[in-house]
Amino acid sequence: MPQLILHNANIHTLDESRPHATAITIDGDRISAVGDDQIVLEAAPSDATTMDMRGSTIVPGLADAHGHMRNFGMMAEMVNLRHAQSYEEVVELVRERSQATPVGQWIQGRGWNQENWSDKSLPTHDLLSEAVPNHPVWLVRVDAHAGVANANALRISGIPGSTLNPAGGIVGKDKDQPNGLFLDKAMDLVRSHIPDITVEKSKELLLAAQELCLAVGLTQVHDAGIDGTTLQAYRELVAEGSLKIRVYAMLARDYFDQTDVSQIQEGLFSCRSVKIVSDGALGSRGAALLAPYSDAPYESGFMLLSRDDFDATVGRALASGFQVNTHAIGDMANRVSLDVLEAALRKHGVSDHRSRIEHAQHLHMDDIPRFSKLGVIASIQPTHCTSDMFMADSRLGPQRTPGAYPWRKFLDSGARIVSGSDFPVESNNPLWGLYSALTRQNHDGQPSDGWRPEERLTLYEALRSFTRDAAYASFQEHELGSLSLGMLADLTVLDTDIANEPPQALLEAKVMATVVNGEIVYKHNLTPSL
Ligand SMILES: [Zn+2]
């Protein structure tokens, strides 16, 4: 393949030795030159293809360090409950879907959020069961840490009133009968009765998600917790040559614990980490806190696994060269996760472990410096902050919010942060993530100064967390993360110079092209002169 030269561009390389350039040469899957137009074009072989980029902006390929590809692909098939303003509206949306669904077939929905309703209590099944009696229904909260089942689904799942709470979960009950609400691990009681997704179907869903990710300029996704079926689906997509986005996968703990694991590197797919979920989320008050919730004085959330199980999985991961990526939202979960890592790292003596805490959302002040001390990476989601900031005020109260989404404190303490979106919980658009990181405001510009604005990131810091540090967090910093000679050619082309426009421009900026491994895998309004 002839070399491809993109010139007359505004290139932010994130390479400190040459932060800015106007031309870049792609030779196969690698970058073979970066510099000024004149020098790069003069050095070009006669058969090179040149593209005049007409001043468009190029940044290193943006990575989402925490997303869920298969779930994202599945969103299109589920009832979208994200915009429902009440439980009545949720029920109506499901009822509409039921009219087009064969009787007896499962109906799944995703995205309800009682925080957006005037009645903010968690939903139960009655209304739903009345409106949709002939289909089993399972509706998952926006954060995936709570679900509500209708009576039909409860019957199929065979959940008697005597059912006890499983470890790490709660079965909602009214008068000793299940009320349809399930939190965290208890969700498996219903979920396990929904027919499994096949490998073939998984491939279809992953490809749908891939398209949606390439279209927003993502060149890589860290898929945060995949099962054996999804792993198989990825490997088949690689073998068939259909995986066009780079994927760094974390194995879900259940699967990791049952399997003989070894590191995988096949085409654009790699896997050498395990995802452990240590607590729930703030929205359903499942995040494990050191002291009770400010808006529910008898609740403190809960851990989703025992200390012994936690120690065992982490020990096995470190011993087998796997990275440990632990979901921790509440200050208690973060503290325990750091304790477990600290003990295991001492025992196994792994130096380059790059353990990550996924979300690292709410920290006790004493624990923030431990990230840097232990070499633990904080894997944050800027949009979680701007979606949940007002809820965090009420859940945590003013004494504790200084430890919520403490990005600046992480950086000041010497810790490394990487950014993602947790899609489909949030939009997968990384430019919206950058906006949240820079402003700590919602899209309406609220609060006017930003929520705890002292924690905002600069554009450079935020971009790093979506590029270079994401590469580091996936052991790929020698090949990815900056536009430098010899690196893999992953880049994102934008119609807006995000470095010289106000943050609001990020909300409107469009992706013109996404290049992965030297191949233009997405383009939009890219009409260069060839
Ligand atoms: Zn997640």
Image (cartoon, rainbow, N blue to C red):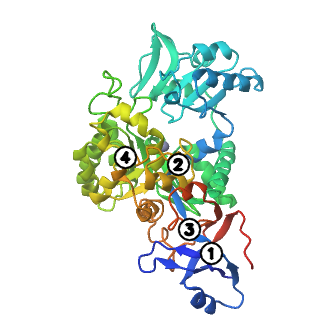
Residue at which label 2 appears:
67
* Label 3 residue near ligand 1, CB within 8 Å: no
Residue at which label 4 appears:
405
Image position, residue 80 (x, y; %): 64, 34
Label 2: how many Cα within 10 Å (few below 14, some 14–19, many 20+): many
- Residue at the image point whose x is 32% and y is 28% from the top: 294
Work out whether mark 4 precedes mark 3 in sequence or the reverse, and give the earlier one.
4
Amino acid at circle 2: Gly
Q: How much space separates mark 2 and mark 4, taking CA atoms?
A: 18 Å
Label 4: how many Cα within 10 Å (few below 14, some 14–19, many 20+): many
- Residue at the image point whose x is 44% and y is 53% from the top: 439
Image position, residue 266 (x, y; %): 57, 62
Q: How much space separates mark 1 and mark 3, taking CA atoms?
A: 9 Å
Q: Is 173 rendered above or below residue 40? A: above
Q: Nearer the viewer, mark 4 or mark 3?
A: 3
CB atoms of marks 2 and 4 within 8 Å:
no
Work out whether mark 2 precedes mark 3 in sequence or the reverse, and give the earlier one.
2
Q: Quadrant of the C terminus?
A: bottom right
- Residue at the image point whose x is 42% and y is 80% from the top: 17
CB atoms of marks 1 and 3 within 8 Å:
no
Residue 260 shows up from this direction? no
Work out whether mark 4 precedes mark 1 in sequence or the reverse, and give the earlier one.
1
Left or right of 420: which side holds 109?
Answer: right
Residue at which label 3 appears:
497
Q: Secondary structure at mark 4?
A: loop
Q: Nearer the viewer, mark 2 or mark 1?
A: 1
Work out whether mark 1 precedes mark 3 in sequence or the reverse, and give the earlier one.
1
